[in-house]
Amino acid sequence: MPSFHLEHDFDCSEDTYWERVFFDEDYNRRLFNEELRFPVWTVLDQKDEGTRVVRNLRAQPPIEDLPGPLKAVVGDGAGYEERGVYDRGTRRYEAKVTPNRMADRVTVTLTMTTRKLGDNRCCRVVDGSVSAKIFVVGALLEQKMIADLTRSYDKSAVFTNRFLREKGLS
């Protein structure tokens, strides 16, 4: 199962990132709708249970530069549901992503953590894996998904630091 590891530094504390950015409605709307240009990004349900936050969302990322063989398999309007749980004690968000097409053949998991870098600075660490059990094009789909996820997280890091400055949180 192909995996990826990403790290991005932010000009804020870990608590600020999780409590005032990651779950912030304005941040998510601007990030996904304006910056990343997702046609669909909607929180279906979010519950703050004290020690943890449970969030379920539906999204449809923009699909660009899809090779012909993948376009035939994936089609237009491919999206997903993400079911995630954030544990405040460990500062760990774990999510399972279920695509709206071929959910029985495609598996995506994500784990996001932060670590302190100093006063008012932290590093977001994202570890994920993608598995596509589709004859002939599975490996190609895995590579495309990892490339798209990496690009999105890289763009989100730039946006996050800009958001922090705009809101006076850094």
Image: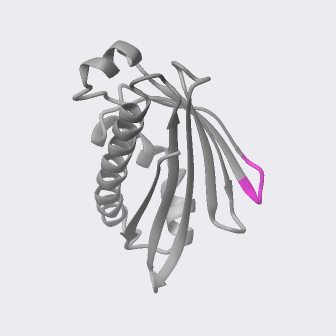
- Position of residue 124 measured from the top left corner of the image (x, y, whole percent): 46, 65
> Secondary structure of the magenta portion, mostly?
loop
Give the left or right position of residue 23, taking residue 90 as reference: left
- Between 118 and 125, which is closer to the camera in this rendering? 125
Report the span colored magenta.
Answer: 48-52
User: Is 86 colored magenta in this rendering?
Assistant: no
- Residue extending furthest toward the left: 65
- Position of residue 106 measured from the top left corner of the image (x, y, whole percent): 54, 30
Residue in the image at 53% along x and 69% along y = 114
Q: How is the image coloured?
A: one colour
- Position of residue 121 measured from the top left corner of the image (x, y, whole percent): 43, 78
Residue in the image at 39% along x and 26% along y = 137
Quadrant assignment, res 18: bottom right
Residue in the image at 49% along x and 75% along y = 13
- Position of residue 79 measured from the top left corner of the image (x, y, whole percent): 46, 25
- Between 53 and 24, which is closer to the camera in this rendering? 53
Where does the C terminus fall, quadrant-wise? bottom left
- Between 76 and 147, which is closer to the camera in this rendering? 147
Q: How many marks?
A: 0
- Residue extending furthest toward the front: 136
Residue in the image at 36% along x and 58% along y = 160
Quadrant assignment, res 11: bottom left
User: Is 49 colored magenta in this rendering?
Assistant: yes
Where 62 sits versus 31, above or below? above
